[in-house]
Image (spheres, helix red, strand yellow):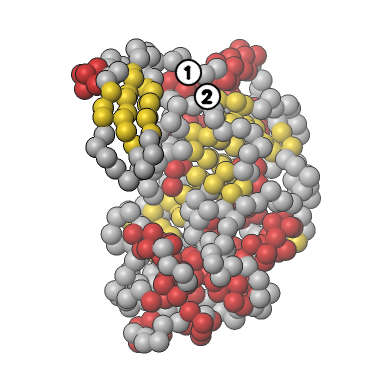
Amino acid sequence: MPRAGAVAFVFVVAVLVPGLALPVDEWPIRGWRTATPESQGLDSGVLADLLDHARSRRLPIHSLLLIRHGQIVLDATFYPYESGTPHDVASVTKSVTSVLVGIALDKGYLKSVHQPVLPLLPAAAPAIVDPRKERLTIEHLLTMTSGLDCGFAPGEQELAAMRSTMDWAAFALALPMRAEPGAQYSYCSPNNHLLSAIVSAQTGGSALTFARKHLFGPLGIRDVTWPADAQGRTHGWGDLHLLPRDLAKIAYLYLHRGRWNGKQVVSEEWVRRSTSPLVKVRDSVGYGYSWWINTTRQPPVFEAEGRGGQRAAVVPDKDLVVVFTGGGVDTDELAPFLFRAIRSDAPLPKVVAVSVRLRNALEAARRPPPARPPAPLPALARSISGKRYIMEPNALGLQAISLFFDKRGHARLEVQMGEH
């Protein structure tokens, strides 16, 4: 996935208290319980190594949340991100849209993933249709095998073009066909906006409205921002904002095969199908219904993933959920620490020195990184600093400008305006 530019950071980590393993019938409806890493079989020393590594490398992480056996064992936020602030989860949104498609199927709003798309969106369908497009189904959208000429060029150009039009679903359906549906994988965000449009058309409300009733509501997720297009169709591919703890609830729902607090929120078969490698993306990476699957890593992992380091990973064999948010971090760099930290399914003995080391690492991470000395001014900046440049007559009435640069790397612009 595309990665954004790096920013400096500092950790802020919640204090965790010892806790017992959650009973099988207890769920985080009113909030997650917390526990020490050792009480849930994790090594605090390795987690301290992770924090030290990230701090020394100034990795652009915003938060890291670990949930083992139903309890939070590490809840870290990184400067400038603050605890309790919803985060743009980027393309993790696609996985949430997929959950809603599954719920819509469970409740009879949709008949099958093999339904053709065009009859479900008649208002957005193009007047002239390539016969291959008539064979485009919901499942093709879910697995990024739509056959649309989309996602083959770098930079998600079709997504940007779609957002410049008045009717995004109509734009997506009007994209030319490049291949037979189902024949070729290509990561295309307009596919997921079509899924959102389908949910809207078949349920009579936006995907957000449907989610509040059938997904967010049952999971106790209330702090949600999820914009819509001009037709009121929720952005199916991205722009969903959630608290990391609430994103963890969706991953935890899938860890438990769609069941939550005694209720089947989405069918077990949908979860199984969604998290199976239905399409090969590349070596060791498969794609299900808008979920990514590592096909060779042991223990097995499936996850929702978005640009910048947004990630909600589920490790069923270890009863573990991991949620990252970031501003351009490659979370694969930290994954080895997480797997090394898992030592046992049973509690580990508490080692005071290791606990102290973790606490010290957290305290060190809370401090802002030392300021770097400003770089020397470039020769061009030195040559123009303080000079007054007279402008030729212009429609803006701009008469003169001056730029001033100081030794701390600060710049000041002075502008002289006149009548025009």
Q: For the point 37% across and 47% down, which residue is it?
A: 2
Q: For the point 38% across and 59% down, which residue is it?
A: 160
Q: Which residue is mark 2?
A: 10
Where is residue 271 drawn, in percent x and y? 58, 62
Residue 145, image quadrant: bottom left
Q: Are marks 2 and 1 in contact (CB under 8 Å)?
A: yes
Say above or below: 330 vs 237. above
Say above or below: 54 vs 119. above
Q: Which residue is mark 1?
A: 369
Q: Residues within 10 Å of mark 2 (few under 14, many from 20)?
A: many
Asked whether, in this view, residue 244 is left or right of residue 27, the answer is left
In the foreground, 41 or 275: 275
Asked whether, in this view, residue 328 is left or right of residue 302, the answer is left
Q: At label 2, which amino acid type do we have?
A: Val
Q: Residues within 10 Å of mark 1 (few under 14, many from 20)?
A: some
Say above or below: 119 vs 98. below
Asked whether, in this view, residue 120 is left or right of residue 140, the answer is right
Q: At label 1, which amino acid type do we have?
A: Pro
In the foreground, 280 or 406: 406
Residue 342 visible to an observer of this rendering: no
Asked whether, in this view, residue 350 is left or right of residue 412, the answer is right
Q: For the point 70% across and 64% down, which residue is it?
A: 214
Query: Which SS class for mark 2?
Result: loop
